[in-house]
Image (cartoon, helix red, strand yellow):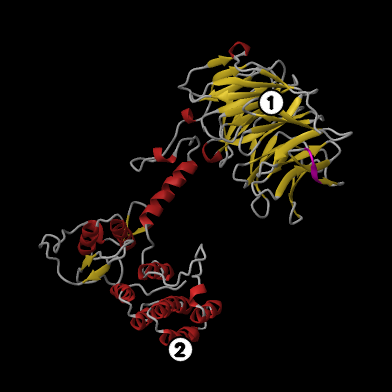
Amino acid sequence: MGGVEDETEPPKKRPRVSGDFANGLSVVSSEPDSSGDIMAHPLPIEGDKEIVGSKGVIKRVEFVRIITQALYSLGYEKSGACLQEESGVLLQSPVVNLLIHQVLNGKWNESVATLKSIGLLDESIIKSASFLILEQKFFELLDDDKAMDALKTLRMEITPLSTNNARVHQLSQSILSPVKFVHVGSSNCSPIRTKSRAELLEELQKLLPPTLRVPDRRLEQLVEQALILQRDACMFHNSEDNEMSLYKDHQCGRDQIPSRTLQVLEAHKDEVWFLQFSHDGKYLASASNDWTAIIWEVDLHGDFSTKHKLFGHQSPVSYMSWSPDDSQILTCGVEENVRLWDVSSGECLHVYEKAGCGFVSCAWFPDGKSMCLGVNDKSICMWDLEGKELQCLKGQRIRKVSDLEVMNDGKQIIYTYRQASILLLDVEAKVERLIEEDQIITSFSLSRDNRFLLVNLWNQEIHLWNIQGEVKLVAKYKGHKRTRFLIRSCFGGLEEAFIASGSEDSQVHIWHRGSGDLIEALPGHSGIVNCVAWNPANSHMLASASDDHTIRIWGLNDLKMKHKGPANQCNGVHYCNRRGT
């Protein structure tokens, strides 16, 4: 980027500013202020120091310019002008104001000449800015039906810049067939030819270094950055950002973390192995060693009730997956069949079977019309909802797939292969990426934004991997217990800022995702906690499933505890004995 020589002395005359343009643009005038002498003779203050603030890192001139720009962007033009006059610090130099005047008045040749004298040190920036100005001149000549003058501008002024040759070619085509010409960057196919001069000015200002022109809304950006840093550093931040205040440093307490049992759900008759909230957070599905799955409904007050109890599997139910629109759900028995259920009625719509094999995991494609199934013969099959096999992946690189995910683009699937490796496969492009651990992988979970993968390991560690582009290990979480059984973890909380996991010590463990610190270990269950699920629509609601046959719903401390057992169930019990055709 280009720079500009710093002015060593402040201006001796304190000019008045007139804010005549949108987006905080202003032009400095050297005329005296008619508002009186009160602003012409500022009192001596500490504002003349070059550095302000207790840390010695804020330059006074930059600070004042940013404040002035903020005043203009908020519409306080008189205040902005007064600040410039009283401080003697201009928002932008007279030569920049001259350039603005010339651009807005269509004085193209003068604008190019001013641009060259503005103090830019980078020749490429000068050429790029000149190109934008002359391109605007070219289009306005075409709009005035002055095709020959436009052609002359193209040949004699734009082409000699020797920059953006592809754009030059487009401009020449626009002379031959102007109706078909579309502005670069246009999102539609309408014949857009000329941008407004104000839009041109915005593009030009993006090229100017900040020493010449303060970036738009710079003060807002700095304040937002400070708030975000405070939020990210806050160990317990789990509330909406609009609750943050500029009046004090941000710090949440533990009361923002779901740590109190609000409900105990007791409808299962054996160990509960798996939990998953629907995408909209209105339902919770649970799978159990009692061969059933239950769909729980969450009302507006956060109370749970049994919507449907799903019968039909001939083995324990170990895995489930909600359809993209939450209208259907897949349940998977242990090395048995997969069943498709209607969430509204509880009816079993289809039973998927593969001769001589059983399924161990399931996932939906984002179109809601097909699914991906992990098979115990070390294959992965793609089926449509009618039970037709669309594709099957099988080979030495695929092991028994206990966990399976399909990414939001519908092109990539994630599954375990070998004991300590996870494969991220682009099915269309046939491109593979690999996560390699040095311990046996027991389970994994994908973040909602598909950027991170949470991997549970045999050695009682949970690893966080960034899977955007080249895979990278970014964090490790320790403290829970896992010696014999499959334990599942999940992302959760506001912006998925927390990691929760079950544990063989009968507790729910919660870590701060960014720091890796263990912030809660929640007692309550009397058996191994196998799985946890955080409500994606309610950052203060967490569910845990245990060998003690119960599901616990965790919330904030100021809420009261309720029990939901068999006596509180509503709706019917649904049996499913249908076979797929």
Residue 66 appearing in the image: yes
Q: Nearer the viewer, mark 1 or mark 2?
A: 1
The relative height of residue 120 versus residue 482 in the rendered view (above or below) is: below
Q: Position of residue 177 (x, y in %)?
A: 51, 78
Name the image quarter holding residue 319.
Answer: top right
Residue located 53% across and 80% down the image: 173
Give the SS element for disc 2.
Answer: helix
Identify the image quadrant of the C terminus: top right
Whole-Å distance between the Cαs marked 1 and 2?
75 Å
Which residue lies most toward the left here? 36
Instruction: From the image, give the main secondary structure of the stretch colored magenta.
Output: strand
The relative height of residue 158 versus residue 16 in the rendered view (above or below) is: below
Give the SS element for disc 1.
Answer: loop
In the image shown, does 296 or 433 lie closer to the viewer? 296
Label 1 neighbour load within 10 Å: few <14, some 14-19, many 20+: some
Q: Which residues are magenta?
A: 387-391
Of the two numbered discs 1 and 2 on the same chain, state the one appearing first in sequence. 2
Q: Amino acid at mark 1?
A: Glu
Residue 502 appearing in the image: no
Q: Position of residue 89 (x, y in %)?
A: 26, 65
Q: Position of residue 38 (x, y in %)?
A: 11, 59
Q: Position of residue 226 (x, y in %)?
A: 42, 48
In the image shown, does 285 or 576 lie closer to the viewer? 576
Number of numbered markers: 2
* In this picture, residue 212 sits left or right of residue 528: left
Query: What residue is pinned by disc 1?
Result: 347
In the image shown, does 253 or 428 lie closer to the viewer? 428
In the image shown, does 86 or 559 lie closer to the viewer? 559
* In this picture, residue 321 sits left or right of residue 134: right
Q: Amino acid at mark 2?
A: Met
Residue located 35% across and 68% down the image: 198
Query: What residue is pinned by disc 2?
Result: 156
